[in-house]
Amino acid sequence: MRLIYTLALHTYALFTALFSFFNRKARMIRLGQWRTNNILRTKIDPHASYIWFHAASLGEFEQGRPLMEAIRRQHPRYKILLTFFSPSGYEVRKNYDGADVICYLPFDTPFRVKKFLNLARPCMAIFIKYEFWMNYLRELKRRRIPTFVISAIFRREQLFFRHYGRWYRRTLECFDRLFVQDRQSAQLLAEYGIAKVSICGDTRFDRVLDIRRQARIFPLLDLFAGNGHCPVLVAGSTWPQDENLIIPYFNSHPGMKLIIAPHEIHREHLLDIESKLQRPSLRISETNQQSVADKDCLIIDSFGLLSSIYRYGRMAYIGGGFGRGIHNTLEAAVYGIPVIFGPGYHKFKEARDLIALGGAFSPGNETAFVRLMDDLTARPELRENTGAIVGEYVKQHTGATERIMAELPFQ
């Protein structure tokens, strides 16, 4: 089965090369991986000790960031090597100053794996959440390089636990320790004889707490929100299906204001949002003190602002729940406000937890959304009580970084 796996990776690499001629993402992966060996040759200090972090994309990077920064503070003798697989992670964070070397991770084929490890020479490897590359993990184990996965979460439907997935489950035995988010993951692993497990929680809670502490202040948004006296809904990472739910309600309820940050901010999407709005709106790129005062909707047409903007909301709507899955719930939850999202939330532990606690809501259709929003906008005490549940949930789940740091084998 390992041979079949490796052949599949070779095939994937070949198709990526072929698609790179007319697909931008494939081209970025191919060129990025092609540059990796040169980056390692020129930037790796042969006299330094590197801890290698691998993140598939931007979300996993944010999950690993608290640990990277804790290592730099507490163990400055180590350097950080950070790799990405996806362009959406690498292109955004290729200049991140918390890592010493940043590059793409080559495909998981034996020759590429050995070449990468020969050049990188890590003294420790840390994979974030979902990255289980068989050939990398086997070679790390063969070289006796301590290897860990952090903030992992396991579900029974994953390939590891299928009757035909035993060959892949052996990959988990390559880790010196698996730092999992919850007791259910640890129990599932124990059923299959995997005992090198620590329940440490999710480092994303530590990350969003850091984000809140460092959140930017926007005086114009204070002015827009009436300095906290107006019920404002912040709708983050929205897709058209989310907007079709939110905007009609906003249009017919002049007692509330809306800040909407679409997941995609290309021209056509922004124009589509503006065409649906029937109340005064403005893009944040066009705001000034005079223009924002009489507007009811603010459209966020810039990246990197949303995590700070949630602080101006009295309620938050998280987009993506009518598609493949909701976006980052915790970025809003850290401000202690009620959280709303569509029905596609079941793969996300924090969303399930908040629903069970009564701190989050998932209206599946327009009628349910209208009923919920009527309650939240008309009853400040409901918003406050629900928000308190959300804030306490985040507070109780911080500390994963500290627990992981205590178990890593620093010299």
Image (spheres, rainbow, N blue to C red):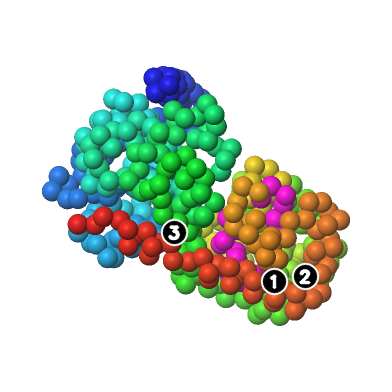
Judged from the image, the secondary structure of the residue bearing numbered disc 1 is helix
Q: Position of residue 77 (x, y in %)?
A: 20, 59
In which quadrant will I find the C terminus?
bottom left
- Residue at the (64%, 74%) spot, across then down: 388
In reply to whether residue 341 is colored magenta, the answer given is yes
Number of the label disc, if any, that sits on residue 200: 3
Q: Could you say which is closer to the camera, residue 50 or residue 221?
A: 50
Residue contact at pointers 2 and 1, CB within 8 angstroms = yes
Q: Residues within 10 Å of mark 2 (few under 14, many from 20)?
A: some
- Give the number of the disc on residue 289: none
Residue type for callout 2: Leu
**Residue 240 seen anywhere in this rendered image of the structure:** no
Q: Nearer the viewer, mark 1 or mark 3?
A: 3
Please state which amino acid type lies under the numbered disc 1.
Answer: Thr
Find residue 386 and name its label. 1
* Mark 1 or mark 3, earlier in chain: 3
| Contact? badges 3 and 2 (CB < 8 Å) | no
| Residue that numbered label 2 is attached to | 376
User: Residues in magenta?
Assistant: 328-345
Q: Is residue 13 magenta?
A: no
Q: Could you say where residue 260 lies in the image, as x and y percent from the top left?
A: 67, 59
